[in-house]
Image (cartoon, rainbow, N blue to C red):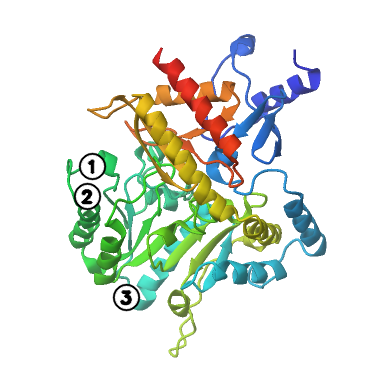
Amino acid sequence: MMDSQTAQLIEKDRNHVWHHLSQHSALKQQDVLKQQDPMIMVKGEGSRVWDVKGNSYLDASSGGVWCVNVGYGRTEIANAVRDQIEKLNFFASTAGTEPSANFAEKLLEKMPGMSRVYYASSGSEANEKAFKIVRQISQQKYGGKKNKILYRERDYHGTTIGALSATGQEERRLHYGPFLSGFVEFPHCCEYRSQFGDVKDYGILAAKELEKVILREGPDTVGAVIFEPITAGGGVITPPEGYWPAVAEICKKYNVLIHIDEVVCGMGRTGKWFGYQHYGIKPDIVTLAKGVASSYAAISCVVTTEEIFDEFLADTRDRDTYFRDVSTYAGCTAGPAAALANLAILERENLVSNSAIMGDYLLEKLEELKTKHSIIGDVRGKGLLLGIELVSDLVAKTPVDETVAMNIAGMCMKKGLIIGRTNRSFKHFNNTLCLCPVLTLTHEEADFIIDTLDSVFVETSL
Ligand code: PMP
């Protein structure tokens, strides 16, 4: 039996809050009793969260959208934010502040080759700013040429119209066209779903698809290409062998900037500080959000090389070449204050290497599950960013319907485990479960994840 305060909170939520990415129903008041209560979260500690009804869950989704990297309940971050906002809560990013300068220096130490940090407050916004950088360079340096931005099928880059114009997920784009011109898609690199059949050099062939699109569009029209280093919400797709060296060569050959979207992969998620660092990539622009402050405060960053920054320096012809961009909340000091405390925790507790170690452990256990359950077609990922692709026929690789993945996630939840999944992103491939736990994950917690999945797969096959 629910107490009256809980019941009231649920009613307030049901009556007033419009949830993200959720199909609300038009049920009349008399049908409400039959409806599932909205989920309301009230507390977090370590890797666990509690809902308003007192149920506790191991959160293998790091907050539902892969962002609470250091886990819940970090007093150290709360104190750092409180101290900072008592001293100075805000000043516009046209000026500097103590935490923004201090965090920029610390962050860049982890990113050799990168040189400048431009602040914003969400992943989408950071990507928008990066697109504006590319477009301004196009105008200032190439007389308007090289303004196109290529993006990869299955990659997600955000919810705003520009970022959605650069997103290769048709269900996320549905209803929001027309999209911006100058954004062009190229094919994905998911080896399990190879476009070329069973081939030896899949990575090279997939990279050549990018080259074909650059040549089709005309290299003098293409300014940049945006990639997730490991596709996250699009089904946890690790790049195939040979892909990145070939891509880097192609971008160099056609003078195309490399923009790496580290919104999910950054800050230790994949077992290195940044996802691109697994593959020897030399990015021109990197965008970060989510794990930057483990979502204790809203902060995102556009990180560039000094060469990119130089394009915006005053030139001798007296033109205004500054970056014509400003966002109010980039000046909130809570973000960089939280980010500094977050970085200190990641370092002190060796959470980046824990992510690598626990990721390997989970992947090994998932491989074992795969031999037991024919619904598992593929397991993949790096560090604590892992995916389980579900199929109804192992040989034909027929994807299960989205409702199957949805039910499995629901069954896990009933057993006290929150997992993620590809959520209404594609027409036929919303069939990947995602594990993205907090980076403090222990062996005991990892075993709970595996045992729960194991029992749910058994029940699903009955
Ligand atoms: N890029 C990637 C790779 C993402 O996964 C997301 C969010 N899931 C974004 C960008 C957009 O970030 P935000 O939701 O903070 O705007």
> 443 or 205, which lies in front?
443
- How dense is the environment of label 1, judged by Cα within 10 Å: few (below 14), some, or many (20 and up)? some
Judging by the rendered image, the residue that carries numbered circle 1 is: 194
Secondary structure category for the residue under label 2: helix
> 384 or 10, which lies in front?
384
Secondary structure category for the residue under label 3: helix
Q: In 3D space, how far apart are the residues under numbered discs 2 and 1 (Cα atoms)?
A: 7 Å
- How dense is the environment of label 2, judged by Cα within 10 Å: few (below 14), some, or many (20 and up)? many
Q: Nearer the viewer, mark 1 or mark 3?
A: 1
Asked where in the image residue 204 lies, by quadrant, the reply is bottom left
Nearest to N terminus: mark 2 or mark 3: 3
For the point 52% across and 45% down, the residue is 358
For the point 28% across and 56% down, the residue is 243
Q: Is residue 314 above or below residue 183?
A: below
Disc 3 residue: CB within 8 Å of ligand 1 = no
Judging by the rendered image, the residue that carries numbered circle 3 is: 142
**Left or right: 79, with 137 as reference point:** right
What amino acid does circle 1 point to? Ser
Q: Where does residue 235 sit, x and y in percent of width and height?
A: 39, 40
**Left or right: 425, with 26 as reference point:** left
For the point 64% across and 39% down, the residue is 47
- How dense is the environment of label 3, judged by Cα within 10 Å: few (below 14), some, or many (20 and up)? some
Judging by the rendered image, the residue that carries numbered circle 2 is: 202
Nearest to N terminus: mark 2 or mark 1: 1
What amino acid does circle 2 point to? Tyr
How many tags in the picture?
3
